[in-house]
Image (tube, rainbow, N blue to C red):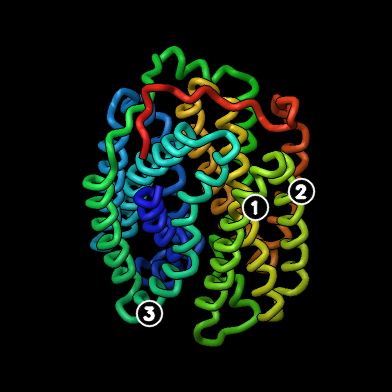
Amino acid sequence: MLILAVGTFVLGVDGFVLPGLLPHVATDLSVSLATAGQLTTAFAVAYAVGSPIIATATGRMDRRVVIGAGMFAFLAGMVLQAAGPSYAVVLAGRVVAGLGAAAFQANAFAVAGVLSRPDRRARSFAVIGAGSSLASVLGVPFGLLVGQWLGWRGAMWTIAALAAAAAVLAAAGLPSVTLPATSLRSRLAVLVDPRILILLVVSALVLAPLYLVSAYAAVVVGVSTSAGGAVLAALCVFGAGFFIGNRLVGRFADRFDSLTSLTAALAVAVGANVVLSVVQHWFVPTLAALFVLGLIGSFLFIPQADRVFVAGGDVAAVALSLNGAMAYVGTAVGATLGGVVLSVAGTLWLAPAAAVLAAIVLGVTRLTAPERRTAAGRPEPANVPAEATGL
């Protein structure tokens, strides 16, 4: 699990650093800030489209090979971004990196889910997610400092170097892990299972309110101050909240049911964005609101992944790949809506828009059918295939 966490750390550094560098990217590539923000959208769309295709195409392959190849593809995308002379080339690099991330991350969570006991599954997901949370604490300040010293391209080269190390580690350090092969018919059956479809719709929505604001954190914090280091401080505070949330979410979701965990997080998202709407002219209260938004980040993903895994049953790996894809759809939707709000209404309306969107998503989530429960109140576990080998 730790090797997989190293990979998610690298992906997390990329995801958390880019929002803080968007003003520099926009200036260097001679595009608007809203256009630069669509680099986040491109990555998310590539992940969303590529994840189920990759899952189907590589269904019979050793997960070690797929995971290693995914990180090497991510590396290639980062090199393309760092060296790209134009916005179009950098955009293409984001697409390549998104496809690599899809191959790596979806398989990482699938392997963890299949090999974990039902009562520890959310914690196993959280271990892999810990890479992202650690990136939010250590990677963000490191990446932004490198960006200040060497430019945003220097930050991309640094992430590329980290990706190279993670790719070698995954290829050399992971044991052989084979998941049970499923037919194309079985994979397509996931798409017509109403329980899974409803959950995937929720997966496509839950992260959108978070990324509507966080993708433009640099301009959000700029409302209250223009002091040097303010963006770095804001992203570090957001990252610290994300790190703490990741440490809490596994035990919370394993102790309570995942639906309760998710709806509670969405309710907090509504409140935090309402508060941010009111206090964004003041720096310290803005930091506090960003901390809370970071705190609930893992609570918006891990419990939902657990819900999808349980509903997936024998094709849980396929369901999880689709869940990851839909999560990135939500990321793309959030970043795109944020760009629209930024262009049409301005920075001050980002948080109010996120609050409204979070309230809508909360309502949709509560209307979804509750999962099957055992007599003990826990979700019924999916079958763990005998063919899987341990990490």
Q: CA distance from mark 2 to mark 3?
A: 37 Å
> For this view, does 380 lie left or right of residue 85?
right
Badge 1 amino acid: Pro
Q: Is residue 238 above or below residue 101?
A: below
| Residue 164 placement: quadrant | bottom left
Left/right placement of residue 347 relative to residue 1 reads right
**Nearer the observer, 354 or 339:** 354
- Foreground pick, 220 / 165: 165
Image check: 133 left or right of 183?
right
Residue at which label 2 appears: 359
Residue 208 appears in the rendering:
no
Residue 209 badge: 1
Q: Are marks 3 and 1 in contact (CB under 8 Å)?
A: no
Measured from the top left, where is residue 184 in percent x and y?
A: 40, 15
The reply to whether discs 2 and 3 touch (Cβ–Cβ < 8 Å) is no
C-alpha span from label 2 to label 1: 9 Å
Q: Residue at x 37, y 23 (%)?
A: 387
Residue 203 vs residue 316, the one in the foreground = 316
Look at the numbered disc 3 and give the secondary structure of its residue: helix
Is label 2 in a helix, a strand or a loop?
A: helix
- Tell which circle, 2 or 1, labels the residue nearer the N-terminal end: 1
User: Residue at label 3?
Assistant: 148
Looking at the rendered structure, the number of numbered marks drawn on it comes to: 3
Q: Which is nearer the eye, 124 or 211?
A: 124
Please state which amino acid type lies under the numbered disc 2.
Ala
Sequence-first disc among 2 and 3: 3
Where is residue 383 drawn, in percent x and y?
52, 22
Farthest residue in the bottom direction? Answer: 227
